[in-house]
Amino acid sequence: MRILVVDDEPELADAIAGSLRREGYAVDVANTGQDALERLTINPYDLVLLDLTLPDLDGLEVTRSIRSDPMFDPTTRILMVTARDSIEERVQGLDDGADDYLVKPFALQELSARVRTLLRRETTGGDAVLLSGELALDTARQLVSWQDEPIELTTKEFSLLRYFMTHEGEVLSQERLLEHVWDEMLDPFTNTARVTVGTLRRKLAAATGHTLIETVIGAGYKFVPPPPG
């Protein structure tokens, strides 16, 4: 999943980004509202962490732009992160299109929990554990298991599997995987996605005895559930 952190305090933005990257998310950072909107026209973000107090556009203006302009993805979740804590401002933010509101100062653990909840809300009905047959992916504890036996994955493999499982049965192009599982620091002309898909597929096959990630020639990859039993 790809996240945009928007905050005019570089140290705080970098701390948030670093914490989320350690959990396997692809994270980009913007320090102004205009920069955020420009990035949103280029990259398909799953979630925006948005400070309300920015040096140019107010966070509420950014939210209204995201929700009203058809050039932006309407499924992008917005988590407002701000020191403003009045009920009126919280209600205004939610009315303008934010999905959740977190008041500074906050613990990074709470931020991570809010992020997990928002990102799985549309795809899993809010469950912390993604299930496909006897394959289980625990988004909170970052654990993957088959028949209750753990499968060792790297952070990026975990993130890739999470994206596959939340889009089960869909054909996902390499470009789409790069957009949602890697951040803007990745060279788009590398074969990183293909290599990581290959290693993840081999690990899953070794653990489950099934090919859960299929190659769709000329189109990309598809996650298919293991057969029953």
Image: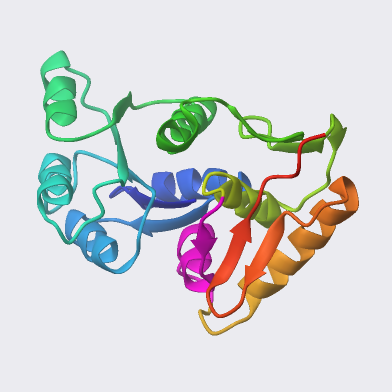
Q: Above or below — where is 124 with respect to 67?
A: above
Q: Above or below — where is 152 with respect to 142?
A: below
Write down the region rendered in magenta. Answer: 169-186
Residue 90 in sight: yes
Coloring basis for residues: rainbow
Q: Residue 202 location, x and y as percent?
A: 82, 61
Residue occupying the point 42% across, 31% down: 121
Residue placed most toward the observer, 190 or 175? 175
Q: Residue 205 location, x and y as percent?
A: 84, 55
Residue occupying the point 85% across, 37% down: 150
Residue 183 in sight: no
Please, which residue is most extreme toward the front here? 228
Residue placed most toward the observer, 174 or 91? 174
Specify whether 205 is left or right of 54: right
Residue occupying the point 18% across, 50% down: 66
Quadrant (top left/top right/bottom left/bottom right) for the C terminus: top right
Q: Residue 170 location, x and y as percent?
A: 51, 56
Q: Residue 50 location, x and y as percent?
A: 28, 42
* Residue 102 sits in quarter: top left
Residue placed most toward the observer, 175 or 30? 175
Specify whether 67 is left or right of 16: left
